C-alpha cells in the first residue's frame, strides 16, 4: 500500500501521508477501500442507466406476471408442460444495482418460456410489437460485466469488514498496552 499511496492519493482525494505516522496510514487505507467500493457502485449505476429502457421492459413483464395469482399459476403450469422448472421472479430495487443483476440472472435461463408466456398473455393492441424481443434479451451479454462487479463488490465488502476488525484489534492493543 505504501508504494501505491503516492499514485492513488490524487485520484481519491487523499493527501499523501508521511510514512512515519502510522495512524494516518491506517486511516488512509480504510478511506481507499471505501472509495473503491463507492467508485464500483458509480461505474455500474452509470452502465445500467444506458440499459434502463430494456430493464424497465423486464420490470413491466415481471410485474404483469406477479400481479395475479392466476397468472402465476398459469405460468407454473406452462413451465411444467414445457419441461422447465417453475420459478417466481422477484423485481429488483432501482437503487440497488446488484438486485437488478440478480433479477436478470434468474430470468435469463427462463428466456423461452417467459417470452412465450408474456407474448401470449400480455395485453397489446392489434399490430403493436411484442413487449419482449431479441433486443431486450441482448442484455444477457452485460451479465458477465455485472457479475465481475458483483464479485468485486463482495470482495470490497469483505475487505472493509476485515479492515474494521483489524482496526478494532489495533485500538484494543493500544488501550491495553
Image (cartoon, rainbow, N blue to C red):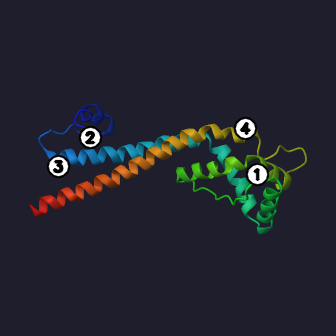
Residue 17, image x and y in percent? Answer: 18, 39
Q: Earlier in the sequence, mark 4 or mark 3?
A: 3
- Quick check: can you spot residue 57? no
Q: Which of marks 4 and 2 is nearer the N terminus?
A: 2
Query: Marks 2 and 1: which is nearer the front?
Result: 1
Q: Earlier in the sequence, mark 1 or mark 4?
A: 1
Q: Distance between the residues labelled 1 and 4?
A: 15 Å
Q: How far apart are marks 4 and 2 (CA)?
A: 43 Å
Quadrant of the image containing the N terminus = top left
Q: How far apart are marks 4 and 3 (CA)?
A: 53 Å
Disc 3, SS: helix
Q: Identify the residue under disc 1.
A: 114
Which residue shows up at 30% across the image and 34% down it?
A: 8
Determine whether, in the image, residue 21 is placed left or right of residue 55: left
Label 3: few (<14), some or many (≥20) within 10 Å?
A: few
Query: Marks 3 and 1: which is nearer the front?
Result: 1
Q: Identify the residue under disc 4.
A: 135
Quadrant of the image containing the C terminus = bottom left
Query: Marks 4 and 2: which is nearer the front?
Result: 4
Residue 20 position by quadrant: top left
The disc label shown at residue 23, or none:
3
- Contact check, label 3 and label 2, Cβ < 8 Å: no
The disc label shown at residue 155, or none:
none
Residue 96, image x and y in percent? Answer: 52, 53
Report the front residue among 153 and 63. 153
Residue 137, image x and y in percent? Answer: 70, 41
Determine whether, in the image, residue 142 is placed left or right of residue 6: right
The disc label shown at residue 14, or none:
2
Disc 1, SS: helix
Q: Distance between the residues labelled 2 and 1?
A: 49 Å
Which residue shows up at 72% across the image and 62% down it?
A: 66
Amino acid at each position: 500500500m505504501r508504494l501505491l499511496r503516492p499514485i492513488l492519493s490524487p485520484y481519491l482525494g487523499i493527501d499523501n501521508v508521511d510514512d512515519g505516522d502510522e495512524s494516518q496510514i491506517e486511516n488512509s487505507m480504510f478511506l481507499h477501500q471505501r472509495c473503491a467500493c463507492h467508485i464500483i457502485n458509480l461505474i455500474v449505476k452509470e452502465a445500467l442507466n444506458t440499459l434502463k429502457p430494456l430493464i424497465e421492459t423486464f420490470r413491466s413483464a415481471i410485474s404483469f406476471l406477479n400481479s395475479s395469482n392466476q397468472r402465476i399459476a398459469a405460468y407454473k403450469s406452462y413451465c411444467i408442460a414445457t419441461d422447465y422448472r417453475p420459478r417466481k421472479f422477484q423485481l429488483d430495487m432501482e437503487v440497488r444495482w446488484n438486485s437488478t443483476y440478480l433479477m436478470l440472472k434468474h430470468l435469463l435461463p427462463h428466456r423461452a418460456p417467459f417470452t412465450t408466456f408474456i407474448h401470449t398473455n400480455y395485453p397489446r393492441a392489434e399490430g403493436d410489437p411484442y413487449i419482449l424481443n431479441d433486443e431486450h434479451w441482448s442484455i444477457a451479454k452485460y451479465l458477465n460485466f455485472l457479475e465481475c462487479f458483483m464479485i468485486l463488490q463482495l470482495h470490497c465488502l469483505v475487505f472493509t469488514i476485515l479492515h474494521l476488525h483489524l482496526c478494532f484489534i489495533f485500538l484494543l492493543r493500544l488501550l491495553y498496552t
